Amino acid sequence: MDTNTHTEVQRYYGKELESSADLKTTACCTADEVPGYAKALLANIHDEVLQRYYGCGLVLPEALNGLRVLDLGCGAGRDVYLLSALVGAEGSVVGVDMTPEQLAVAQRHQEFHTKAFGYDQSNVDFLEANIEKLEATDLEDNSFDLIVSNCVINLAVDKGAVLRSAYRLLKPGGEMYFSDIYADRRIPEHLVSDPVLYGECLAGALYWNDFEQIAKESGFHDPRLLKREPVEVTDPDLRLKLGALRFNSATFRLFRLAGLEAGRENYGQQAVYRGTIAEHPEQFRLDEQYQFQRGQATAICGNTYRLLRHTRFMAYFDLLGDDSVHLGEFTDTKPAELEPGQADKPLAGGCC
């Protein structure tokens, strides 16, 4: 464990930054458009919490009601409180962060948000801990439906440790949904040791291919990229240091699923979105490849069939076909074709 790096990150986010206005790049400031339903909820979040937000994306996955959620690197708690409103009184959210100053802001306004969202008691908890050392906490294995993180894993020294713990803490069928910064090549060592570049979420960014390898080694065998946006480095001195390096803010979905295949295979399977997720009545975007329209049959690969079948999304889909007939590699340009009798009736939706 690199103690110096952790200490510097704590200093940067606890002492150096007073608000998002102090950042020197857009890496830790989301450019994503906030959907209408979330805007209404954000209006109920305390101003001090909002001012201390340093995220690089929107960690708002679908179908959250009643879920138990863990936020890794929660900071001052903006996403924790937003998620607490979306999971409802029957759900709960735990925020973990290693910076005392940030957690103090989050905890100071816990009662404020309990009243703002109309709850009888708070459905959030905060824990001071290093997300690379979650095994040292009392968080139980297989206890979370969803884990989120917003522009924090790049700050971790041992990113594999974070992902391995996430896999362990998720229930089977659970999801890790997170936004972070990625580089178009591996970061040179002399830049990794630059405290400002590291604190600005750049020097600790993973190269795309290295991230996918670490994710698979941690048990997440089929990483799904949802979206990506280029990061603008606005400070001229930092641009000069970075040279040809380019960065993107990206959101990935990782699922704890068994039985996934190494590639995308074609079994002639299809999925029909019912349109029953409250905030997404007409369409549901699973990742960059799959956007499902309500009532339309969409060809899917075998891994996507398993994903929809064994996660919370089963309640919102009718699935057609099975894996009894292999039709070769699944490609975007090669629609799956159902064998005769393979989809006489859809697999009914329901909790896995």
Image (cartoon, rainbow, N blue to C red):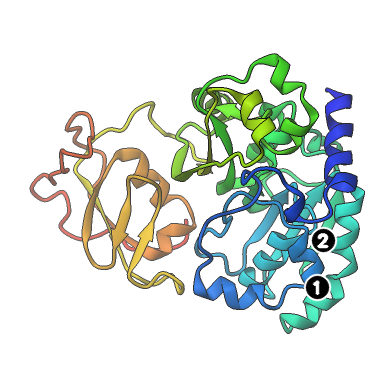
Residue 104, numbered circle = none
Query: Is 176 placed left or right of 3 in the picture?
Result: left
Reply above or below: 269 against 154: below
- Tell me the quarter of the picture where residue 76 sits: bottom right
Which one is in front, 320 or 242?
242
| Residue at x 13% of width, y 46% of height | 338
- Amino acid type at circle 2 is Asp
Q: Residue at x 34, y 28 (%)?
A: 263
Relative placement, left or right, of 214 versus 72 is left
Q: Are marks 2 and 1 in contact (CB under 8 Å)?
A: yes
Q: Position of residue 252 (x, y in %)?
A: 51, 43
Q: Residue at x 44, y 58 (%)?
A: 313
Work out whether residue 101 can be spotted: yes
* Mark 2 Cα shell of 10 Å, populated few (<14), some (14-19), many (≥20): some
Q: Which quarter shows the N terminus? A: top right
Q: In this view, does 337 lie to the left or right of 68?
A: left
Q: Name the residue under label 1.
A: 122
Measured from the top left, where is residue 199 in percent x and y?
76, 37
* Mark 1 Cα-neighbour bin, 10 Å: few <14, some 14–19, many ≥20: some
Q: Nearer the viewer, residue 66 or 17?
A: 17
Which residue type carries mark 1?
Answer: Ser
Identity of the residue furthest to the top in this view: 189
Q: Which mark is residue 125?
A: 2
Residue 254 screen position, x and y as percent:
52, 41
- The image position of residue 110, as x and y in percent, is 84, 70
* Whole-number angstrom distance, CA of label 2 to CA of label 1: 8 Å
Extreme residue in the front direction: 236
Q: What element carries label 1?
A: loop
Does residue 99 show up?
A: no
